[in-house]
C-alpha cells in the first residue's frame, strides 16, 4: 500500500510515492458507482463495505466535500483528503431566471477552474413542467393531482431538463444546439451531477417531493450511451429517483434504441422520439440523420422496447411554419401513428426561434388546428408550453454555453 501518514507525508513530500490516481487531478468520486467506490476504498486500505457509506454520502446526503462525510471518522476523512480524494461534483456557476419561473443554469465541472474549455453545460429547471412529460406520461395523472394543493401539484410537476453532451453532432436544421457541433461527451458524473446540483438548489427532498427528469437538454443521449445509462443507474439506484419519471429523447439513433430496449425495467426511463415530420422526405430535409435511419427503421427499433403497463412512447413533433404544420401533415402523422401499432402520445412543440435559423414560428391557428386534427383522429396529443424562452432555456435553444 502506497500510503503514508499525512504528517509524515508533508515532511517528506518528495519521498512519498504518490499514485497518479491519488492526485487531486484524479477522477472525482462523484459519478463512480458503488462497486467503483468500494474498489477505491479497498485501494486506500479500507474495507469494501464502506463503499455503501460513501455512495450514501455522495448521492443521498448530497455531501459536496469529503470533510462532510459524517459516517467516516475524522481520521479517515483526513487520510482520504491527503490522498487527493475529492467529491468533484459539478456546481451551478451561473443562473438565468425567466419571468415564468424557469431557471437555466450553467453547470461547471472542475475543468473550469483549470481553464479547460468548453466545460460548462446547460440544465433547466421548470417548476411547473411544460405539460410535455409528467409522471407516467399518460396525462391521466394530472387529473388526479388536481385534487391536491396548488403547492403540492406544482412540486409534482417540476421538471429538470438534463444535457448529455456539450453541443451535438446530429445537425437538425431547426436546432440551435446543432450549431455548436459536438464539443464533447459528458461523463456519467457530469450528467448525474446536473440533477443533484439542481435538487440541492431547489431543496428537493427525495421521498417527499416528486420531480421529473427529461434528458432533452443539449446533445443526443444515445450517442453517449454508456455514460448516459451509467448516470441513469446512479440517479435511480443511489439518488433515489424513479425511472418512470424520467424520459429520454432521441433523434432516432437505432443502435441506441436497440440497446435501450435491452435495459431492465427497473432502470429504464421512458422513451421519446423526435419525429418532427410527417414523412421521410420532410424529415430527411430537416433532420439529416433520417437518411441513415428512416422513420420505419426507428419505429421498428422502438417496437423492441417492452413497455410497462399504460406506458406510451412519446413522439415529439416540432411545428415549423409551412414545413411541418399543415393540415395534411397532421393527417399523415395520425396515419403514421396508427401504422406503427405503438401506444403513442404526440407532444407538439411550437418551434422556438434562434439566431441564424431559417424557419418561422407557426401561427397559433396552425398549432391549434394540428392539435385538434390529431385529437380528432384519436391520437393522444399534448401541446408543450415553451418555458423560459426569454432566457433561451426552451427546447432547442440551449447553446450559449461556449460563448459564456
Ligand atoms: N437530441 C435529442 C434530445 C434533445 S432535443 C433529440 O433530438 O431528441 C429535445 C427536443 O427539442 C427534440 O424533440 C427536438 O426536436 C426539440 N427541438 C430542437 N430544437 C428546437 C426548437 N428550436 N424549437 C422547438 N423544439 C426544438
Ligand atoms: Fe441534436 Fe436533438 Fe438538436 Fe437534433 S434536436 S441537433 S439531435 S440536440
Image: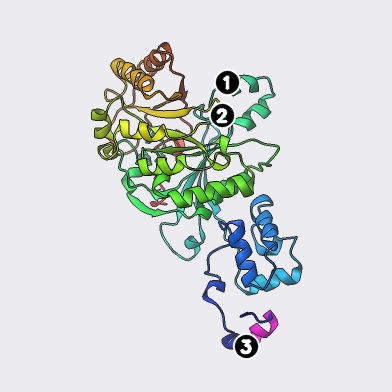
Crowd class of label 1 (few under 14; some 14 to 19; many from 20; radius 10 Å): few
Crowd class of label 3 (few under 14; some 14 to 19; many from 20; radius 10 Å): few
Q: State the image quarter where residue 280 is shown.
A: top left
Residue 99 location, x and y as percent?
52, 33
At 62% from the left and 88% from the top, the residue drawn is 12
Residue 314 location, x and y as percent?
45, 29
Residue corresponding to mark 2: 136
Residue 310 location, x and y as percent?
54, 25
Crowd class of label 2 (few under 14; some 14 to 19; many from 20; radius 10 Å): many
| Mark 2 CB lies closer than 8 A to ligand 1 | no
Q: Is residue 17 above or below residue 195?
A: below
Residue corresponding to mark 1: 140
Q: Give the Cα distance between marks 1 and 2.
A: 9 Å
At 69% from the left and 24% from the top, the residue drawn is 149
Magenta stretch: helix, strand or loop mostly: helix
Residue 187 location, x and y as percent?
48, 55
Amino acid at each position: 500500500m502506497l500510503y503514508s501518514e499525512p504528517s509524515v507525508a508533508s515532511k517528506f513530500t518528495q519521498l512519498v510515492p504518490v499514485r497518479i490516481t491519488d492526485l487531486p487531478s484524479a477522477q472525482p468520486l462523484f459519478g463512480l458507482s458503488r462497486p467503483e467506490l468500494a474498489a477505491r476504498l479497498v485501494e486506500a486500505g479500507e474495507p469494501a463495505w464502506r463503499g455503501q457509506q460513501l455512495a450514501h454520502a455522495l448521492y443521498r446526503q448530497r455531501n459536496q466535500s469529503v470533510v462532510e462525510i459524517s459516517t467516516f471518522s475524522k481520521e479517515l476523512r483526513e487520510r482520504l483528503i491527503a490522498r487527493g480524494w475529492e467529491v468533484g461534483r459539478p456546481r451551478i456557476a451561473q443562473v438565468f431566471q425567466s419571468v415564468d419561473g424557469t431557471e437555466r443554469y450553467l453547470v461547471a465541472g472542475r475543468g473550469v477552474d483549470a481553464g479547460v474549455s468548453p466545460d460548462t453545460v446547460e440544465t433547466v429547471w421548470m417548476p411547473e413542467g411544460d405539460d410535455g412529460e409528467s409522471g407516467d406520461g399518460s396525462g391521466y395523472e394530472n387529473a388526479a393531482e388536481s385534487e391536491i394543493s396548488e403547492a403540492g401539484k406544482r412540486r409534482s410537476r417540476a421538471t429538470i431538463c438534463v444535457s448529455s453532451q456539450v453541443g451535438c453532432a446530429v445537425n437538425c436544421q431547426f436546432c440551435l444546439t446543432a450549431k455548436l457541433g459536438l464539443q464533447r461527451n459528458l461523463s456519467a458524473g457530469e450528467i448525474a451531477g446536473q440533477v443533484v446540483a439542481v435538487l440541492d438548489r431547489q431543496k428537493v427532498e427525495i421521498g417527499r417531493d416528486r420531480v421529473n427528469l427529461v434528458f432533452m437538454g443539449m446533445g443526443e443521449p444515445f450517442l453517449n450511451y454508456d455514460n448516459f445509462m451509467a448516470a441513469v443507474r446512479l440517479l435511480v439506484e443511489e439518488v433515489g429517483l424513479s425511472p418512470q419519471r424520467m424520459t429520454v429523447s432521441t433523434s432516432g439513433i437505432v443502435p441506441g434504441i436497440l440497446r435501450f430496449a435491452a435495459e431492465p425495467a427497473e432502470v429504464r426511463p421512458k422513451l421519446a422520439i423526435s419525429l418532427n415530420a410527417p414523412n421521410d422526405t420532410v424529415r430527411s430535409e430537416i433532420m439529416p440523420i433520417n437518411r441513415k435511419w428512416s422513420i420505419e427503421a426507428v419505429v421498428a427499433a422502438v417496437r423492441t422496447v417492452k413497455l410497462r403497463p399504460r406506458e406510451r412512447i412519446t413522439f415529439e413533433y416540432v411545428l415549423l411554419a409551412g414545413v411541418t404544420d399543415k393540415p395534411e401533415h397532421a393527417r399523415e402523422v395520425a396515419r403514421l401513428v396508427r401504422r406503427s401499432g405503438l401506444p403513442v402520445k404526440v407532444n407538439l412543440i411550437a418551434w422556438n426561434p434562434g439566431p441564424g435559423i431559417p424557419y418561422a414560428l407557426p401561427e397559433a391557428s396552425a398549432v391549434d388546428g394540428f392539435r385538434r386534427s390529431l385529437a380528432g383522429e384519436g391520437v393522444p396529443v399534448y401541446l408543450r408550453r415553451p418555458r423560459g424562452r426569454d432566457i433561451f432555456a426552451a427546447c432547442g435553444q440551449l447553446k450559449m454555453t461556449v460563448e459564456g
